[in-house]
Amino acid sequence: MKKRKSSKINHLESFSRFYREIQEKSDVKIKGYIDIQRAKSDEDMKRHVSALSEDFQSRVEAIGEQFGGLNNRLDSVDKRLDSHSEMVGKLLVSMDVVKTNVEFMKDSLKKKVDYDEFIALERRVPRLNQK
């Protein structure tokens, strides 16, 4: 019986060693496979990130160009607004002159007789001269 136990133990130990060797070999293979897959994945990821980066940079560049165009348009609108402000200032001065002239004309017209009153006076004067 002892021989059986010892042969069983020897058999178990040899099986255990065999299993460890297979496990170590498969671990090495699995690690190698994982390393290869990681390297492929890293390359794919680098290509993908590079493509995204290029796309992003081109879009930012386009936005920069549009901003430059808008900036130029704003400058031209600003110049036009300045010229319009200048014109409005000149018109205000002219309106002050027109107001002054209208006031002067109103005052001088108050001193004059209108047409109906003039006709009435023309009729009255000859009658008064006759008397």
Image: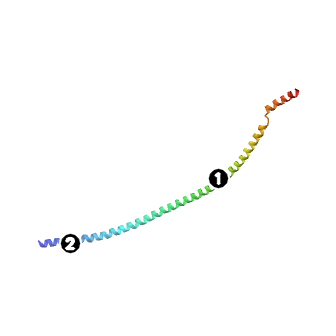
Residue hosting label 1: 81
Q: Is residue 93 left or right of residue 36?
A: right
Mark pair 1, 2: CA separation: 97 Å
Disc 1 + disc 2, Cβ < 8 Å:
no
The answer to whether residue 23 is left or right of residue 90 is left
Q: Nearer the viewer, residue 129 or 59?
A: 129
Q: Quadrant of residue 126?
A: top right
Secondary structure under the numbered disc 1 in the rendered image: helix
Disc 1 or disc 2, which is closer to the eye?
1
Q: Nearer the viewer, residue 60 or 106?
A: 106
- Quadrant position of residue 6: bottom left
**In-image side of 121 versus 98 (left or right):** right
Q: Residue at x 75, y 44 (%)?
A: 101
Q: In x, y percent, where is residue 11?
A: 19, 71
**Dot 2 crowding, Cα within 10 Å, few <14, some 14–19, many 20+:** few
Q: Nearer the viewer, residue 120 or 89?
A: 120
Q: Residue at x 35, y 69 (%)?
A: 32
Q: Label 1 is placed on what type of residue?
A: Leu
- The residue shown at (12%, 72%) is 2
Classify mark 2: helix, strand or loop. Answer: helix
Disc number at residue 13? 2
State the image quarter where residue 127 is shown: top right
**Residue 104 picture location, percent across and down:** 76, 42
